[in-house]
Image (cartoon, helix red, strand yellow):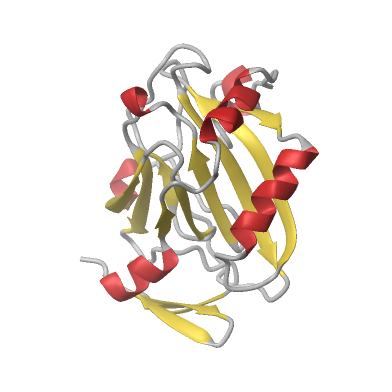
Amino acid sequence: MVDAAWQEKLIRVIDDFVDDPAALRKEALRLAYAEPPSQIKQDALGPIARYSSVPSQTQEYFVQRLQQHLPGDIDHINVEYRYVHAGTVKRQVCHADGCDYAGVVHLTLPEHCQGGTWFFRHRPTGHICCDRTLPMQHDYTDSKLWERYYEAPMRFNRLAFYPGELFHAIATPHFGDRVENARLAMTFFVRLKEPLRVTSSGAQQEIAVGSKRYRLHM
Protein backbone atom coordinates (compact mmCIF):
# COMPACT_ATOMS: atom_id res chain seq x y z
CA MET A 1 0.00 0.00 0.00
CA VAL A 2 0.99 3.62 -0.45
CA ASP A 3 2.30 5.50 2.57
CA ALA A 4 -0.71 7.66 3.45
CA ALA A 5 1.58 10.37 4.84
CA TRP A 6 2.92 11.33 1.40
CA GLN A 7 -0.25 10.37 -0.48
CA GLU A 8 -2.50 12.72 1.47
CA LYS A 9 -0.03 15.59 1.24
CA LEU A 10 0.87 15.28 -2.45
CA ILE A 11 -2.38 14.06 -4.05
CA ARG A 12 -4.71 16.81 -2.88
CA VAL A 13 -8.50 16.97 -3.15
CA ILE A 14 -10.53 20.08 -2.30
CA ASP A 15 -14.31 20.03 -2.65
CA ASP A 16 -16.57 23.00 -3.49
CA PHE A 17 -13.56 24.74 -5.02
CA VAL A 18 -15.17 27.57 -7.02
CA ASP A 19 -18.00 29.81 -5.84
CA ASP A 20 -20.22 29.32 -8.90
CA PRO A 21 -19.42 26.02 -10.66
CA ALA A 22 -22.64 26.22 -12.70
CA ALA A 23 -21.40 29.45 -14.32
CA LEU A 24 -18.02 27.85 -15.04
CA ARG A 25 -19.72 24.85 -16.63
CA LYS A 26 -22.01 27.11 -18.67
CA GLU A 27 -18.97 28.97 -20.01
CA ALA A 28 -17.26 25.68 -20.90
CA LEU A 29 -20.32 24.36 -22.75
CA ARG A 30 -20.57 27.32 -25.11
CA LEU A 31 -16.96 27.15 -26.32
CA ALA A 32 -15.64 25.42 -29.45
CA TYR A 33 -13.29 22.47 -28.90
CA ALA A 34 -10.33 21.27 -30.95
CA GLU A 35 -9.63 17.61 -31.68
CA PRO A 36 -6.24 16.38 -30.36
CA PRO A 37 -3.80 14.65 -32.77
CA SER A 38 -4.25 11.33 -30.93
CA GLN A 39 -7.91 11.23 -32.01
CA ILE A 40 -7.38 12.49 -35.56
CA LYS A 41 -4.71 9.84 -36.18
CA GLN A 42 -5.77 7.12 -33.80
CA ASP A 43 -2.44 5.31 -33.69
CA ALA A 44 -0.82 8.45 -32.28
CA LEU A 45 0.06 8.95 -28.62
CA GLY A 46 -0.42 12.03 -26.47
CA PRO A 47 -3.38 13.90 -24.94
CA ILE A 48 -6.79 12.35 -25.67
CA ALA A 49 -9.14 15.15 -24.60
CA ARG A 50 -10.86 17.73 -26.78
CA TYR A 51 -9.67 21.13 -25.58
CA SER A 52 -10.53 24.83 -25.55
CA SER A 53 -8.85 27.94 -24.15
CA VAL A 54 -10.16 29.42 -20.91
CA PRO A 55 -11.15 33.12 -21.15
CA SER A 56 -8.60 35.39 -19.49
CA GLN A 57 -10.94 36.70 -16.76
CA THR A 58 -11.87 33.16 -15.71
CA GLN A 59 -8.21 32.09 -15.74
CA GLU A 60 -7.23 35.03 -13.53
CA TYR A 61 -9.94 34.11 -11.00
CA PHE A 62 -8.88 30.46 -11.04
CA VAL A 63 -5.16 31.18 -10.61
CA GLN A 64 -5.85 33.40 -7.59
CA ARG A 65 -7.78 30.59 -5.91
CA LEU A 66 -5.28 27.89 -6.85
CA GLN A 67 -2.17 29.79 -5.73
CA GLN A 68 -3.13 29.64 -2.06
CA HIS A 69 -3.07 25.82 -2.17
CA LEU A 70 0.30 25.41 -3.89
CA PRO A 71 3.59 25.08 -1.98
CA GLY A 72 5.27 27.84 -3.97
CA ASP A 73 4.69 30.76 -6.33
CA ILE A 74 3.49 30.08 -9.87
CA ASP A 75 6.03 30.89 -12.58
CA HIS A 76 3.87 29.69 -15.51
CA ILE A 77 0.47 28.03 -15.87
CA ASN A 78 -1.49 26.55 -18.77
CA VAL A 79 -5.26 26.28 -18.21
CA GLU A 80 -7.78 24.66 -20.58
CA TYR A 81 -11.29 23.28 -20.63
CA ARG A 82 -11.17 19.64 -21.74
CA TYR A 83 -13.67 16.86 -22.27
CA VAL A 84 -13.45 13.11 -22.96
CA HIS A 85 -16.41 11.04 -24.22
CA ALA A 86 -17.16 7.34 -24.67
CA GLY A 87 -15.82 7.29 -28.22
CA THR A 88 -12.36 8.47 -27.19
CA VAL A 89 -9.53 6.16 -28.26
CA LYS A 90 -6.82 5.64 -25.64
CA ARG A 91 -3.57 3.73 -26.25
CA GLN A 92 -1.51 4.81 -23.24
CA VAL A 93 -2.03 3.24 -19.83
CA CYS A 94 -0.72 6.34 -18.09
CA HIS A 95 1.69 9.24 -18.51
CA ALA A 96 3.63 11.95 -16.67
CA ASP A 97 3.09 15.62 -17.48
CA GLY A 98 6.59 17.11 -17.21
CA CYS A 99 5.47 19.95 -14.92
CA ASP A 100 5.57 20.66 -11.19
CA TYR A 101 1.82 20.34 -10.61
CA ALA A 102 -1.14 19.22 -12.70
CA GLY A 103 -4.80 18.82 -11.92
CA VAL A 104 -8.44 19.33 -12.71
CA VAL A 105 -11.59 21.04 -11.50
CA HIS A 106 -14.37 18.59 -12.35
CA LEU A 107 -17.36 20.14 -14.11
CA THR A 108 -19.26 16.94 -14.93
CA LEU A 109 -22.78 16.98 -13.49
CA PRO A 110 -23.26 14.82 -10.36
CA GLU A 111 -25.58 12.38 -12.15
CA HIS A 112 -22.88 11.66 -14.74
CA CYS A 113 -19.83 11.52 -12.45
CA GLN A 114 -17.81 8.30 -12.48
CA GLY A 115 -14.13 7.47 -12.40
CA GLY A 116 -11.65 10.24 -11.71
CA THR A 117 -7.84 10.12 -11.88
CA TRP A 118 -5.80 6.92 -11.49
CA PHE A 119 -2.20 6.73 -10.25
CA PHE A 120 0.28 4.04 -11.27
CA ARG A 121 3.53 2.30 -10.28
CA HIS A 122 6.03 1.18 -12.93
CA ARG A 123 6.54 -2.52 -12.15
CA PRO A 124 10.08 -3.01 -13.58
CA THR A 125 11.62 -0.15 -11.57
CA GLY A 126 9.14 0.24 -8.70
CA HIS A 127 8.92 3.95 -9.53
CA ILE A 128 5.71 5.92 -9.12
CA CYS A 129 7.18 9.16 -10.39
CA CYS A 130 9.03 10.04 -13.59
CA ASP A 131 12.65 10.95 -12.84
CA ARG A 132 13.85 12.77 -15.95
CA THR A 133 17.47 12.70 -14.79
CA LEU A 134 17.57 8.95 -15.47
CA PRO A 135 18.51 7.60 -18.93
CA MET A 136 15.34 5.59 -19.52
CA GLN A 137 12.19 5.74 -21.59
CA HIS A 138 8.96 4.25 -20.29
CA ASP A 139 6.62 2.20 -22.44
CA TYR A 140 3.27 3.72 -21.51
CA THR A 141 1.32 1.42 -23.82
CA ASP A 142 2.09 -1.97 -22.19
CA SER A 143 -0.45 -2.61 -19.41
CA LYS A 144 1.69 -5.45 -17.97
CA LEU A 145 4.29 -2.87 -16.92
CA TRP A 146 1.92 -0.78 -14.81
CA GLU A 147 0.15 -1.32 -11.49
CA ARG A 148 -2.69 0.99 -10.43
CA TYR A 149 -2.52 1.87 -6.74
CA TYR A 150 -4.80 4.85 -6.11
CA GLU A 151 -7.79 6.79 -7.45
CA ALA A 152 -8.85 10.39 -6.82
CA PRO A 153 -12.60 10.11 -7.52
CA MET A 154 -14.52 12.55 -9.68
CA ARG A 155 -17.01 14.90 -8.04
CA PHE A 156 -18.68 18.05 -9.36
CA ASN A 157 -16.70 21.18 -8.37
CA ARG A 158 -13.86 19.11 -6.91
CA LEU A 159 -10.27 20.28 -7.35
CA ALA A 160 -7.78 17.41 -7.59
CA PHE A 161 -4.09 18.23 -8.04
CA TYR A 162 -0.75 16.47 -7.66
CA PRO A 163 2.91 16.60 -8.75
CA GLY A 164 2.77 16.36 -12.53
CA GLU A 165 5.53 13.74 -12.68
CA LEU A 166 3.45 11.14 -10.81
CA PHE A 167 2.37 8.49 -13.30
CA HIS A 168 -1.38 8.98 -13.76
CA ALA A 169 -4.29 8.72 -16.19
CA ILE A 170 -7.95 9.56 -16.66
CA ALA A 171 -9.90 6.73 -15.04
CA THR A 172 -12.12 4.66 -17.31
CA PRO A 173 -14.79 4.01 -18.39
CA HIS A 174 -15.13 7.02 -20.65
CA PHE A 175 -18.74 8.09 -20.92
CA GLY A 176 -21.14 10.40 -22.74
CA ASP A 177 -21.46 11.27 -26.41
CA ARG A 178 -21.06 15.06 -26.30
CA VAL A 179 -19.59 17.77 -24.08
CA GLU A 180 -22.84 18.10 -22.08
CA ASN A 181 -22.72 14.53 -20.69
CA ALA A 182 -19.02 13.61 -21.00
CA ARG A 183 -16.10 14.00 -18.61
CA LEU A 184 -15.72 17.80 -18.54
CA ALA A 185 -13.07 19.59 -16.53
CA MET A 186 -10.89 22.64 -16.27
CA THR A 187 -7.34 21.27 -16.45
CA PHE A 188 -4.09 22.98 -15.54
CA PHE A 189 -0.34 22.48 -15.66
CA VAL A 190 1.89 24.54 -13.37
CA ARG A 191 5.56 25.38 -13.29
CA LEU A 192 6.68 26.85 -9.95
CA LYS A 193 9.39 29.43 -9.44
CA GLU A 194 11.13 26.87 -7.21
CA PRO A 195 10.64 23.57 -9.07
CA LEU A 196 9.89 20.23 -7.43
CA ARG A 197 12.86 17.87 -7.44
CA VAL A 198 12.66 14.10 -7.99
CA THR A 199 15.51 11.83 -6.88
CA SER A 200 15.77 8.06 -7.24
CA SER A 201 17.93 5.37 -5.65
CA GLY A 202 16.94 1.99 -6.99
CA ALA A 203 13.21 1.58 -6.39
CA GLN A 204 13.20 4.31 -3.72
CA GLN A 205 12.16 7.81 -4.77
CA GLU A 206 11.74 11.17 -3.13
CA ILE A 207 10.11 14.44 -4.14
CA ALA A 208 11.48 17.64 -2.65
CA VAL A 209 8.90 20.41 -2.33
CA GLY A 210 10.75 23.46 -1.07
CA SER A 211 12.38 22.39 2.21
CA LYS A 212 10.08 19.35 2.60
CA ARG A 213 10.96 15.91 1.30
CA TYR A 214 8.50 13.07 0.71
CA ARG A 215 9.64 9.47 0.34
CA LEU A 216 7.52 7.72 -2.28
CA HIS A 217 7.21 4.01 -1.62
CA MET A 218 4.66 1.24 -1.79
Q: Whole-percent x and y of residue 30?
A: 66, 17
Task: Return the residue found at the far right.
Answer: 56
Task: Return the residue found at the far left.
Answer: 1
Does residue 43 lie above or below 202 as drawn? above
Q: Whole-percent x and y of residue 202?
A: 38, 78
Does residue 119 lie above or below 155 as drawn? below
On screen, residue 199 versus residue 156, left or right, reads right
Which residue is at the front of the view, 68 or 142? 68
Task: Return the residue found at the far bottom.
Answer: 211
- Identify the residue shown where x is 55% and y is 71%: 134
Q: Whole-percent x and y of residue 27?
A: 65, 25
- Identify the residue shown where x is 71% and y is 53%: 77
Does residue 31 lie above or below 92 as drawn? above
Q: Quadrant of the N terminus?
A: bottom left
Which residue is at the front of the view, 177 or 120? 177
Which residue is at the front of the view, 10 or 91? 10
Total marks placed? 0
- Identify the residue shown where x is 59% and y is 82%: 210
Q: Quadrant of the C terminus?
A: bottom left
Q: Whole-percent x and y of residue 173?
A: 32, 27
Task: Find residue 55 and report its image quarter.
Answer: top right
Task: Return the residue found at the far top.
Answer: 177
- Identify the residue shown where x is 50% and y is 85%: 212
Task: Find residue 5 and report its image quarter.
Answer: bottom left
- Residue 151 in view, yes or no: yes
- Residue 49 in view, yes or no: no
